Amino acid sequence: MKRQRNTKPVARKTAKDQQVGGDHYLKMGVEPWDVVDSWTLEQRIGYYRGNALKYIMRMGTKDKAAQEIAKARHYVDKLIEVMGEAE
């Protein structure tokens, strides 16, 4: 039997819709990402790239390693979104 492909559009969460390690940023009136997203494309790429690197490099030294990597992935997801804007 042939499987049919689901053609319904899937609502994708953006990186901003998620938070790793608590909800402290979600409680702010203006989140840090709101400010960063007002910067130039080059500045945003540098910020998100640098923060991904930070979490990878400090893996396991502040929080549990898996949580640090999840934070890094969160920044990489945001970086992918920002890079998509450049295309």
Image (cartoon, grey):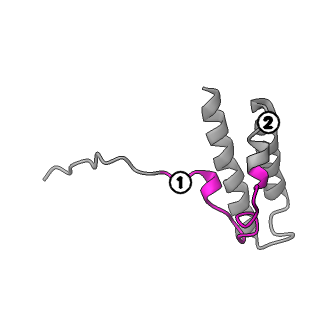
Q: Nearer the viewer, residue 60 or 21?
A: 21
The residue that appears at 81% across and 38% down in the rendered structure is: 46
Lateral position of residue 81 relative to residue 67, left or right: left
- Residue 34 versus residue 20: which sits nearer the camera? 34
Counting labels gives 2
Mark 2 element type: loop
- Alpha-carbon neighbours of circle 1 within 10 Å: few (<14), some, or many (≥20)? few
Q: Is residue 11 above or below residue 21?
A: above
Numbered label attached to residue 75 = none
Magenta segment, prevailing SS (helix, strand or loop): loop
Q: Is residue 83 above or below residue 31?
A: above
> Seen from this angle, which residue lies furthest left?
1
> Where, quadrant-wise, is the C terminus in this rendering?
top right
Seen in the image, is 49 located left or right of residue 86? Answer: right
Q: Element under label 1?
A: loop
User: Which residues fall within the magenta stretch?
Assistant: 12-33
Q: Which of the 4 image quarters holds residue 82?
A: top right
Residue 41: x %, y % from top left: 75, 31
Q: Nearer the viewer, residue 17 or 28?
A: 28
Residue 45 sits inside the magenta stretch: no
Q: Which residue shows up at 31% across the image and 48% down it? A: 8
Q: Which residue is at a point 82% across and 35% down the rendered structure image?
A: 43
**Residue linked to disc 1:** 13
Amino acid beneath label 1: Lys
Q: How far apart in space, not on screen, are marks 1 and 2 (Cα)? A: 22 Å
* Mark sitting earlier along the chain (1/2): 1
Question: Looking at the image, which residue is at 70% across and 68% down?
Answer: 66
| Three-letter amino acid code of the residue under disc 2 | Trp
For discs 1 and 2, the disc positioned in front in the rendered view: 2
Q: What residue would you read off at disc 2?
A: 39
Point out residue 51 in the picture as x, y percentages from the top left corner. 81, 50
